[in-house]
Image (tube, helix red, strand yellow):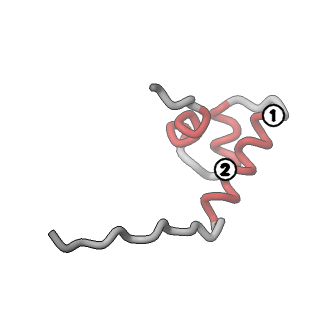
Amino acid sequence: MDFQIRPAKQHSGGKLSCEREEYFRLMQLGYGNKEASKLVGINARTGSKSTASPTL
């Protein structure tokens, strides 16, 4: 079998990264998920998934 493993992609820290940082900053300030998500401009489900801990 001939195949190559691709190198890991490097994220540039674009829009998504900025949105996540702002979302977490608002959450630390005491905003709820719905409020923080609305202010950042993301769906509330996206916000709640960002804070969910991974299950093992």
Q: Which residue is mark 2?
A: 20
Left or right: 48 in relation to 8: right
Q: Residue at x 58, y 39 (%)?
A: 50
> With respect to residue 51, does 40 lie above or below?
below
Q: Residue at x 63, y 34 (%)?
A: 34
Q: Residue at x 75, y 50 (%)?
A: 22
Name of the residue lying farthest toward the left: 1
Amino acid type, label 1 = Gln
Kindly identify the amino acid type of the residue bearing the numbered disc 2: Arg
Q: Residue at x 81, y 29 (%)?
A: 30
Could you tell me residue 48's position as x and y percent? 56, 33
Nearer to us in this view, 11 or 29:
11
Provide the secondary structure element on which disc 1 rests.
helix
List the residue tagged with mark 1: 28
Q: CA distance from mark 1 to mark 2?
A: 12 Å
The picture quadrant where one finds residue 5 is bottom left
Q: Nearer the viewer, residue 35 or 10?
A: 10
| Mark 1 / mark 2, whichever is N-terminal | 2
Quadrant the N terminus occupies: bottom left
Give the percent coordinates (x, y) of residue 46: 52, 42
Quick check: 53 above or below 39?
A: above
Q: In what element is the residue under mark 2?
A: helix
Work out which residue is located at the far front of the displayed protein and give it.
1
